[in-house]
Structures are given as structure tokens and as C-alpha cells.
Amino acid sequence: MSKVRLGIVGFGAQGGAYAGFIAEGRVGNMEIGAICDIDPEKKKAVAEKYPDVPFYEDYIEMMESGNVDAIVTTVPHYLHPEMGIEALKRDIHVLGEKPAGVYTKQVKELNEFAAKKPELTFAIMFNQRTNELYQKVKEIIDNGEIGSIRRTNWIITTWWRPQGYYDQSAWRATWDGEGGGVLVNQAPHQLDLLQWIAGMPKKVYSNVKYGYQRDIAVEDEVTTLLDYGNGATGVFVTCTHDVMGTDRFEILGDKGKIVVDDSKKVTVKRLKQPENEMSNSMSMQDVMKIFMGGTTDDIYETEVLEFESVWGGQHVAVLENFAANVLDGEPLIAPGSDGIHGVALANAIHLSSWLGKEVELPVDEEVYLEELNKRIEEEKATTK
């Protein structure tokens, strides 16, 4: 096999984009094996755009056709684990879309099944992990350049969505159809990056607003306090009603600070000596010199890095990496099993707000599912 034949399950915006990347030759080690969608209109669209590509209305039939070596699951979130397991059962490689699922119990089932099939490639579309900016931030943290993390603070509100966006389809922004709002739709990449770079928190306390500025059942405003268990804390803020939007990620360490602005610019300030040593060794005269307008050159050095990204480039990189793992065993950028971490964090944020108290990670899966199902039933009752 010189190219991986990818079966695209779901021919919406994301599935259509992946088909385009592959058809344009941007993914050199991959070709479109087949496309699947339950919408008859999509069959016409595929026939016009990709007349030589087989089309299926049933993804099981597609996987058993012999036309695909792997699938990507560009379908509603609840279906990601189920489709992943069905593919693995048939010795089909799996590239899961984000999020890995809606709740950790179903994602754990997928991970456990995938672990029994180590010969198959199981990855997740965390394309932001290919972003050179975030790779650099992780490298700085991992190398200990700013020391031990004391605080993280990420405000990511660049997701403005008008009411019309939510009114496009009945499943969107519902507990039954999507499993949540901004945490499961717009912010999974940031939740993944946060834990990938800074580690998973031990406890979460959140203030979440449901249908705050939009006529929806799910969350459109989130403010969360993170407790990393070692004294370090964090704040994560996101929403879908800020038309002017902010994207600012700050990580404070005992030897420096990293500030990421708009996912394009990184400012790194490295202390000449750890903050504790400064505190213990500096006289008040030294301190006054700083506050009275003195130079900070003797205290820290500043490095500013600028990054540019090409739309689609990160997705193409994950597709290429996935195919390279299938073909040659190249290490995965984002193993599929990593998908559970962001889901666990989103579940904890939801559960804390539902119970009105701080919760520990990992959360009780049965309690989470019980609370989620309550909201699904309430939603069904109000839409009858």
C-alpha cells in the first residue's frame, strides 16, 4: 500500500474540507476511498464533485466494501466512539474527530477497545498540536525554561456565533444532539492544548451559563477555576457571544512567564534567577529601583516570537501523519487515546456547575451521565 484510502463519514463542512485537501493532492500519502452520508442531497454533491468516488448511505456498508483502509468520523459527537469501535472491529484504522466523545465513559470504551488492536492506527484530529506556536510553548515548558508552573490563564472568546448559527439545524446546541455547547463544539482544541502543555488539573470549580445570550439549552459562557493540586491554579474563560473576541494564554512559572496573543505571537520572559531567590536576596533598595522606573534588564530577558499559519495546513499535517503511521509506523502527533483528557476536563466543568461545587478529576462517570441524561429528558419535554 502506497497510499491510505480514507473513508470520510459525514460530508458536511469538515468532511468536505478533508475531501478537498486530499483531492487537491495536499495529502501526498492519502486518497479518498469512499464518502458516506445519510443525507440524499450529499449523494448528488459527491457525484458532481467526485464522480469516481464510491458513495454510501451506511457507514458499515462502506467499511465492509473493501474500498477503505481507514475512516475519519466527521459526524455528531455522540457517534465518534461508536463509529470508531465499529471500524476497529473490522480492522479499519481510525482518525477520530474532536471531541473524542461527549462523556468519558463512552470514550474509555473506545480507548479500551483500541488498546486490544495495537496493530491498527488510532488517532484524533487535534490539529492544533501541529501548530508551531504551541509546539514551541510546550517545548519551553518541558525544558523547564520558565520553571515550575504557578498559574495558567486562558481567555478564548473568539468564537462569536449569532443566533442564526444555532438555528441551522435541530441537533445543534442541544444536549441530546450535540452534548453541550462551547465546551464540546468550539473549545475542545484549547482544552486539549491546556492539558497537553500544562497538565491536567486535580480539581475544577466552574461558573457556567446556559442559554445566557443565545436561545439555546447548552452553555454559551464559561468561567472555570483550575486547581493543579500542587499550589498552582488556573482560570479558563470561553464564550460564543463576544463579537470582538480575545485569545490570550498566559503561563506564569517561578523562573519566567509566557504570554500567547491571538495564537500568533509568543512573548517569553525569562528571569535571570528564580523568583524565590530574588525575594530572599534583594534588598528593599534594589526593589525600589525597579518600581521607580529602573531598568528590568538585570531581572529578566524578553524574547518575542511571531508565527503565521496557512488555513488547512494543520489539518493536512494530521492527515499526513495519520497515513504515515499506517504506512510506515511514524509516531502519531495525537494518539486517539489522548482524546479522553479534554473530554474529562469538559465533563468536570459541566458537572461542577450542575452540582454547584468543586469537583475532583476524574469525575464520577455515572454521576455525570445521570446529570447529562436529566438535561436530555428536560430538553425533550420542553420541545414536545
Image: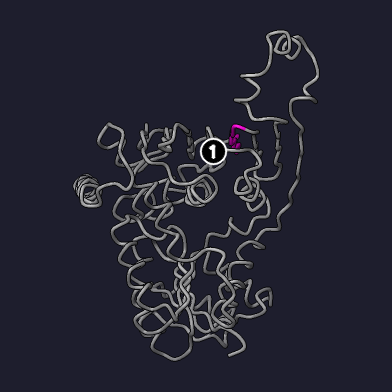
Please identify the quarter of the rendering in which residue 205 is found. top left
| Total number of numbered discs in the rendering | 1
Decide whether residue 251 is among the magenta residues: yes
Q: Give percent across and percent down for residue 136.
A: 67, 50
Q: Give percent across and percent down for residue 69.
A: 49, 84
Residue 263 versus residue 332: which sits nearer the camera?
332
Q: Give percent across and percent down for residue 272.
A: 73, 31
Residue 168 versus residue 260: which sits nearer the camera?
260
SS at badge 1? loop
Residue 213 in sight in this render:
no
Please identify the quarter of the rendering in which residue 255 is found. top right
Q: Residue at x 70, y 34 (%)?
A: 270
- Please tell me whether residue 135 is drawn above or below residue 16 in the rendered image: above
Q: Which residue is mark 1?
A: 157
Q: Give percent across and percent down for residue 41.
A: 45, 73
Residue 245 relative to residue 213: left or right: right
Please identify the quarter of the rendering in which residue 92 is found. bottom left
Image: magenta residue range? 244-254
- Please tell me whether residue 160 is drawn above or below residue 113 in the rendered image: above
Q: Residues within 10 Å of mark 1 (few under 14, many from 20)?
A: many
- Please tell me whether residue 53 is drawn above or below residue 102 in the rendered image: below
Decide whether residue 274 is among the magenta residues: no
Q: Quadrant of the N terminus?
A: bottom right
